[in-house]
Image (tube, rainbow, N blue to C red):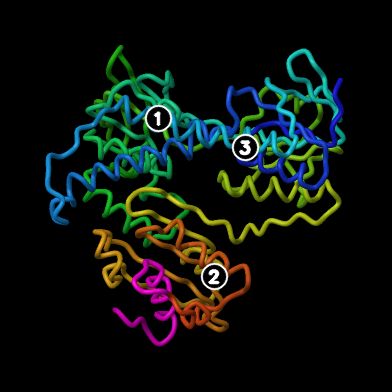
Amino acid sequence: MASYDVIVIGAGPGGYVSAIRCAQLGLKTAVVEGRETLGGTCLNVGCIPSKALLHATHSLHEAEHNFAEMGLKGKSPSVDWDQMKTYKSNVVGQNTGGIEFLFKKNKIDWLKGWGSIPEAGKVKVGDEIHEAKNIIIASGSEASSVPGADVTIDEKIVVTSTGALDLPKIPKKLVVIGAGVIGLELGSVYARLGSQVHVVEFLDHITPGMDVDVQKGLLKILKKQGLEFTLGAAVSKVETTKTKAKVTYKLRKDDSEHQLDADVVLVATGRKPFTDGLGLEALGVEMSPRGQIKTDSQWRTNVPGIYAIGDAIDGPMLAHKAEDEGMAAAEVIAGKHGHVNYDVIPGVIYTTPEVASVGKTEAQLKEEGVAYKVGKFSFMGNARAKAVHQGEGFVKLLADKATDRILGCHIIGPAAGDLIHEICVGMEFGASAEDIALTCHAHPTFSEAVREAALACGDGAIHM
């Protein structure tokens, strides 16, 4: 029986980051992981492989639509789908292998297998039981199905994001159920590869929870890119044959029933915590009605010595949120002060153009009765964006009307996922819109659009 200061269950972004931080703080650490590779859903069948396919298909789009205008003449490239998937797998391998190297560097033991907690202070992996003064549950999440609908996921015809990343061939017709991050990203991938993509969404808008201007602006852009949308529609069932599927849905406005034929159906209706097999019920660990592990402000469960982080607990299911919680929980266990600012956690959609958001939306500020002002700047006024065929989109900055303190930012545009962090840092330090406006930004860069939006919160943008 091995004994540790900390055993982390799960080697996804939350788990492996937490383990590394524990080891850095001098704690003897082990990680339980049943996959053949480290990195969890994110690195193996989520964030990383999807970004590889997004990059590959964006490059294809550039070659087909923009190369000739730039003087790059020649035959348009053909798609070798198997080679594209090999490229994706190589990217995954480089990243998961990197985590294994970091484990060895930090002297973290990898306990290979699926873990359970027979009692506080003990973790069972296979037939072996290991002792731990502290246990961190970082078991992540799994794809959820369509609520109230007759849908059977087989990962062949009806797939989650996992199956969608490894289809044997490019479908002629793809129906996506759900217009959130996963559905729009993978829908974009297959639309660029030539699939006819139809997105069906229960709500009357896409990207639930994001700013209304983002929802409207991105919908318009994606329609121009060839994606079709049916909004305000409740899917009731998906019927399959050996090679085809039929999606039945009802429009909420008039209860009329409609059907869509598809070669593949992607179910992208969100994710749910994955805690099966851990033995939490027998331990008496408190759970929420949504199946999340309840924790206090220090990521402790109600059972002493057991902590939980990431997708398994409340909050946005984002890899970077899990990482922050993992580091913070490690700090708490080591007797330090762990902290996560949940008001400054950015969200990104990696379509082209990218979408990024942090802080409050305009609707939230209205609901809270906060007096605010808006600074908005279009990327059509940004020289660099126009030079690379990405003049669509905008930066929208929200600031307190009285103090000018930044309350939120919403971006559709090139490199939005990187640009948003200027605002994240600003918000961490309590910056005003004027602070951003008075900061010199290099020219020509996409970041100038952020400065212009900040200027628009005051006397006005320069280039609009």
| Residue at 17%, 48% in the rendered image | 65
* Residue type, mark 2 in image: Leu
**Which residues are the magenta region?**
442-464
Image vertical order of residue 181 relative to residue 422, above or below: above
| Residue at 51%, 67% in the rendered image | 422
Characterize the local packing of mark 2: few (<14), some (14-19) or many (20 or more) Cα atoms within 10 angstroms: many
Taking the image as shown, residue 214 lies to the left or right of residue 32, namely: left
Distance of label 3 from label 2 (alpha carbons)? 29 Å
x, y percentage for residue 96?
Answer: 55, 33
* First-in-chain label (2 vs 1): 1
Q: Report helix, strand or loop for mark 3.
A: loop
Quarter where residue 230 is shown: top left
x, y percentage for residue 118?
Answer: 81, 22
Taking the image as shown, residue 99 lies to the left or right of residue 151, namely: right
Judge depth for marks 1 and 3 and give the one in front: 1
User: What residue would you read off at disc 1?
Assistant: 165
User: What residue would you read off at disc 3?
Assistant: 290
As drawn, the label of residue 321 is none
Q: Report helix, strand or loop for mark 2.
A: strand
Does the stretch in magenta take in 248? no
* Residue type, mark 3 in image: Arg
x, y percentage for residue 106?
Answer: 73, 39
Quarter where residue 383 is shown: bottom left
* First-in-chain label (3 vs 2): 3
User: What residue would you read off at disc 2?
Assistant: 407
* First-in-chain label (1 vs 3): 1
Judge depth for marks 2 and 1 and give the one in front: 1
